[in-house]
Amino acid sequence: MEDLQSRMDCIKIAFSKHFTRGRSYERAFARSEILQMLKYGWVIEYDPRDKKACVLGYTAEYRPIHVIISFGDVPVVITAYNPRSKQWKWNKSFDRRICFCK
């Protein structure tokens, strides 16, 4: 993630159809917010098998965002959501999952 953050200005990050046409669009996250958050956010979960990470960051208005990103040849933002929508799954700072239920 640090490597990605250091190269944010010169690499391309793709957005999945799920993000652009799905729930992330409905949740009103601008691409600029997501890119800014990826630049300054931090990884809170990582799945080495799928090379996916959940990154926590905050908007300029201090709204928390979790972004699921896949690390391949080109990083792909899969989805983004406000962890407050399922607050019972996270600790108070939204950086650690406390319930693994659906």
Image (spheres, rainbow, N blue to C red):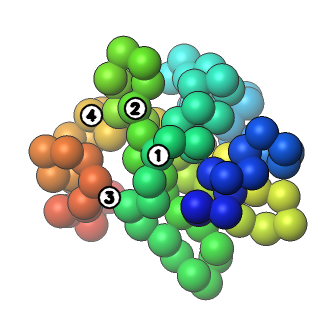
Report if residue 16 is visible in the image. Answer: no
Image point (38%, 61%), residue name: 44
- Marks 3 and 4: which is nearer the front? 4
For this rendering, which residue is in front, 11 or 31? 11
Image point (84%, 48%), residue name: 11
The kind of secondary structure element at disc 4 is helix
In the rendered image, which residue does mark 3 sit on?
102
Image check: 77 left or right of 100? right
47 lies above or below 9: below
If you read the primary sequence from the N terminus, does the residue marked by circle 4 or circle 2 appear first? 2
Residue 95, image x, y percentages: 28, 54
> How far is the residue under mark 3 from the one under mark 4?
15 Å
For this rendering, which residue is in front, 37 or 45? 37
The kind of secondary structure element at disc 3 is loop
If you read the primary sequence from the N terminus, does the residue marked by circle 1 or circle 2 appear first? 1
Q: Amino acid at mark 3?
A: Lys
Residue 13, image x, y percentages: 79, 45
Asked whether the beta carbons under mark 3 and mark 1 sit within 8 Å of each other, the answer is no
Q: Amino acid at mark 1?
A: Gly
Which residue appears farthest toward the front when viewing the image? Answer: 6
In the rendered image, which residue does mark 1 sit on?
41
> How far is the residue under mark 1 from the one under mark 4?
17 Å
